[in-house]
Image (tube, grey):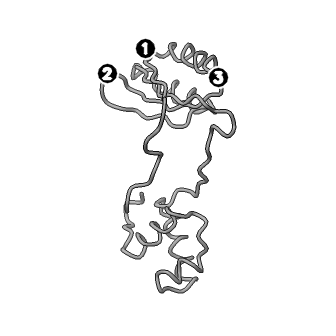
C-alpha cells in the first residue's frame, strides 16, 4: 500500500464490491453507491496507481484441470540461501503461494499437482535448500476468501 494514500469509506465500499465481483461494471458500482461512473473510474484508477488494488482475479476449480493433489510444504531455508531459493521457487508453476514464516520452518509453500509423483519430485528438489515437512490436503472447509475492508 502507498504510504501517502489512505482509502476513505467510499474507496472501501468500491473495493468491497469488487472483492465480491471483480467483473462488476463501473456503471453498476456507481448506481449502488450513488456516484457517477467517471467518479468510480477515477477512484479505481487511483486505487490501482497507489498499489491498493493489485489485480483482478478469476477463481478456478483446479480439480477441473486434473490438479487433484493440493499440499503445503514446510521448508527450512538457511538465511544465506533465501535469495537463491526465492529465484528458484518463483519459476515453479505449480506453486500457488510461498510465504516466509516464523516457527520451526522458515517457508510454507502451497502447491497443486496432478500426480503424487510430481509432488515427490518437487520435495526432492526442495531438500537442496533444507529439511521439508509435507502436508497433503484431504479437503478444504473454507476456500480462499478476502477479509472485510
Q: Are marks 3 and 2 in contact (CB under 8 Å)?
A: no
Task: Work out which quarter of the rendered image holds the C terminus and state it.
Answer: bottom left
Q: Is residue 149 above or below residue 36?
A: above
Disc 2 packing (10 Å; few <14; some 14–19; many ≥20): few
Q: Position of residue 55 (x, y in %)?
A: 56, 56
* Left or right relative to 6: residue 51: right
In the structure shown, which secondary structural element does the residue marked by tag 2 occupy? loop
Q: Point out the tag, 3 or 2, that comes first from the N-terminus.
A: 2
Residue that appears at 57% across and 76% down: 41
**Tag 1–tag 3 contact (CB < 8 Å):** no
Q: Earlier in the sequence, mark 1 or mark 2?
A: 2
Query: Which of the marked residues, 1 or 3, is nearer the chain's N terminus?
Result: 3
Quadrant of the snapshot with the N terminus:
bottom left
Give the spatial CA distance, label 1 vs label 2.
10 Å
Q: Nearer the viewer, residue 6 or 72?
A: 72
Residue at the spot of label 3: 115
State which quadrant residue 88 falls in.
Answer: top right
**Residue that label 2 marks:** 104
Looking at the rendered structure, the secondary structure element under dot 1 is loop
**Where on the picture, by quarter, is residue 147?**
bottom left
Q: Nearer the viewer, mark 3 or mark 2?
A: 3
- Residue 142 in percent (x, y) is at 43, 45
Residue bearing mark 1: 131
Q: Is residue 88 above or below residue 61?
A: above
**3D distance between C-alphas at marks 3 and 2:** 28 Å
Q: Secondary structure at mark 3?
A: loop
- Name the quadrant containing residue 89: top right
Between residue 70 and residue 43, name the one nearer to us.
70
Q: Residue 58, percent across and down?
A: 61, 53
Q: Give the residue drawn at x 49%, y 67%.
A: 47
Amino acid at each position: 500500500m502507498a504510504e501517502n494514500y489512505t482509502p476513505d469509506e467510499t474507496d472501501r465500499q468500491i473495493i468491497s464490491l469488487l472483492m465480491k465481483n471483480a467483473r462488476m461494471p463501473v456503471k453498476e458500482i456507481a448506481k449502488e453507491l450513488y456516484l457517477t461512473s467517471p467518479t468510480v473510474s477515477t477512484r479505481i484508477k487511483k486505487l490501482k496507481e497507489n498499489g491498493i488494488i493489485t489485480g483482478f482475479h478469476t477463481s478456478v476449480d483446479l480439480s477441473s484441470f486434473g490438479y487433484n493433489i493440493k499440499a503445503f510444504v514446510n521448508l527450512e531455508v538457511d538465511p544465506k540461501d533465501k535469495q537463491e531459493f526465492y529465484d528458484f521457487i518463483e519459476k515453479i508453476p505449480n506453486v500457488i503461494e510461498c510465504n516466509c514464516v516464523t516457527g520451526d520452518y522458515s517457508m510454507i509453500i502451497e502447491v497443486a499437482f496432478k500426480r503424487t509423483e510430481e509432488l515427490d519430485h518437487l520435495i526432492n528438489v526442495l531438500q537442496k535448500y533444507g529439511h521439508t515437512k509435507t502436508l497433503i490436503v484431504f479437503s478444504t472447509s473454507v476456500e480462499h476468501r478476502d477479509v472485510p475492508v
